[in-house]
Amino acid sequence: MPRYVSSEEAAHLLAKAARVLVIGCSGGGKTTFSAKIAACRNLEFQSLDRDVRWLPGWVERDRAGQREIIAQLAQRERWVMDGSGASSFDLRLPRTDLVLWVRVPRHIALLGLFKRVFRYYGSVRPAMAEGGPEPLPDRDFLSYIWNFEERYAPLIIKQIDQHGPTVPVAVLRSHREMDAILQPFSKRQ
């Protein structure tokens, strides 16, 4: 079982963490949240979509190439990394000080996706590789979001158990909880 911590404890741990992994379903707000953490804590922001998975024009990098880049990024001293790909948890979790798991309800994730598409459709959003304009979501992607908790959360839990059983994990179920974790840092600025 992952080492779950409260959001209050997570805020305290975040103040000291050098390496933070933000995971969760697409559309839940993990990339925006990660960028805010990076800014508040002066950590390097690494987006697996932008920096690892996608090449220009929505061409997916091969798995071996992805793992090589992730291994290099994970060895850096200070970072916030967003991305839920459990296939690389063996590279990321042993180096992680804190996991923040964005687990908003699926209707909130779908709403987030539609807001993102409305805002960025046809252009490249900040956390995406160049030459990858935001597309309209297809049925498979909508199904991925709708079924994320049922299909992927058990795999994530298993990977955390296997590769990071002592890493503290905070489950954040709303944007309000995400904002609350950042609140102590906004008071300092």
Image (cartoon, rainbow, N blue to C red):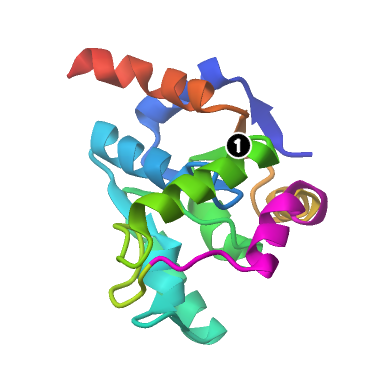
* Quadrant where the C terminus is found in the figure: top left
Q: Position of residue 154 (x, y in %)?
A: 80, 50
Magenta-drawn stretch contains 148: yes
Decide which of 21, 72 is in the foreground and name it: 21
Q: Is residue 38 left or right of residue 108?
A: left
Question: Please, is residue 179 above or below residue 117 in the view?
Answer: above
| Residue located at (66% from left, 39% from top) | 107
Mark 1: secondary structure? helix
Q: Residues within 10 Å of mark 1 (few under 14, many from 20)?
A: some
> Does residue 21 show up?
no
Residue range in magenta is: 134-152
Say whether residue 136 is left or right of residue 14.
Answer: right
Q: Is residue 21 above or below residue 40?
A: below
The answer to whether residue 51 is magenta is: no
Q: Which residue is mark 1?
A: 108
Residue at the image position 43 percent from the left and 79 percent from the top: 58
Residue 151 position, x and y percent, is: 80, 56
Which secondary structure is most common in the magenta stretch?
Answer: helix
